Amino acid sequence: MDKKKVAVPLVCHGHSRPVVDLFYSPVTPDGYFLISASKDSTPMLRNGETGDWIGTFQGHKGAVWSACLDTNALRAASGSADFSAKIWDALTGDVLHSFEHKHIVRACAFSEDTHMLLTGGFEKILRIYDLNRPDAAPREIEKSPGSVRNVTWLHSDQTILSCCTDMGGVRLWDVRSGKIVQTLETKSPVTSAEVSQDGRFITTTDGSSVKFWDANHYGLVKSYNMPCAVESASLEPKYGNKFVTGGEDMWVRVFDFFTGEELACNKGHHGPVHCVRFSPVGESYASGSEDGTIRIWQLGPANSEDQEVATANGKTKVAANDVARKIEGFHIPKDGQAEG
């Protein structure tokens, strides 16, 4: 509307190594939350709106490749190079369970109903842990054709999506039979896969391409070539009219979903962007980089009813108060530093 301003993100420091995964919780009665995974071995929890640090999960002994929150943001999960996946109490920071693997765990995801945890990694095995019986052996899905990089659930936990580090394609597995029911073909290995909030689209990145697939019939809906190799893309959840990408060139770009036109190019990171995610309300999006920072960017001129959101003073205070219960009792490291 008014003249184009340079986007000024909220910059979240705290990680001492590259940030490799970001995950927003759905909106909860306490607001929404952002968890980050980093090679520094300590996932961090933040207020998703303000970026304020809430706590650090300490216990892994190797790089953490994946981190997520359950639907209510009461528990966190992480997958690590220390050959384990852990479940954490998101209110206290305590480890609730540690699931040992025989190789690096690259990906983890809570089921929508929060009762199960899915993991995948270098072992090429997808495992489903029953969180109501954490000591029971996990269910192992038929062997993945390659080393697993990403996993997620869809279709009300009836389908599992996985992609591999070392080969193209997105595989969709029927949870009941444990068999691959569909493969979405891509030329290059898929670096990120996201199911849209309304369950309609699967957003993937491979090479320098961003693709949108019909999540129910699996047809390719749109494919756009990007100016450089992209590592991550995320679709705006409210209207589905924009998407954001991050990749090798250190810039975070916003595009029109329908035309592929570039709407914004945000500069600020000092290393490749490994992950981008829209917040669940669609007003902002976060990027995580090789430079160890997370940046939270506002989407731009808000609709008139949302006008105050961007200026945020009153709104931020409310969110900070909402979040107070989560902060109480969280283990804060003595020096505030992440332990390598």
Image: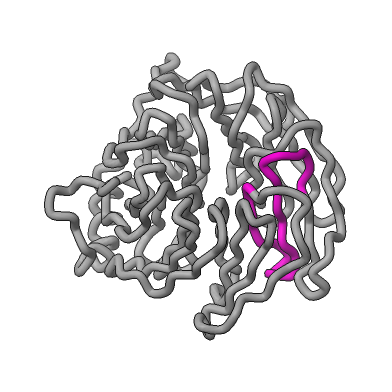
Specify the principal SS of the magenta part.
strand
Spot occupied by residue 160 in the image (x, y as percentages of width and height): 72, 62
Of residues 101 and 321, the one nearer the viewer is 101
The correct choice, above or below, for 306 with respect to 178 in the image is above
Spot occupied by residue 168 in the image (x, y as percentages of width and height): 77, 39
The correct choice, above or below, for 79 with respect to 70 in the image is above
Of residues 324 and 89, the one nearer the viewer is 89
Residue at the location (40% across, 24% down)? 269
The quarter holding residue 109 reads: bottom right
Q: Quadrant of the C terminus?
A: top left
* Magenta span contains residue 288: no
Residue at the location (56% across, 51% down)? 106
Residue 328 appears in the picture as rendered: yes
The quarter holding residue 124 reads: bottom right
Residue 26 appears in the picture as rendered: no
For residue 311, side relative to residue 163 (left or right): left
Spot occupied by residue 257 in the image (x, y as percentages of width and height): 69, 33
For residue 119, side relative to residue 125 (left or right): left
Residue at the location (57% across, 54% down)? 107
The correct choice, above or below, for 274 with respect to 26 in the image is above
Q: Which residues are magenta?
A: 149-170
The quarter holding residue 209 reads: top right
Q: Give the residue at the far top of this rendering.
A: 3
For residue 134, side relative to residue 42 (left or right): right
* Magenta span contains residue 157: yes
Residue at the location (39% across, 21% down)? 270
- Mark count: 0
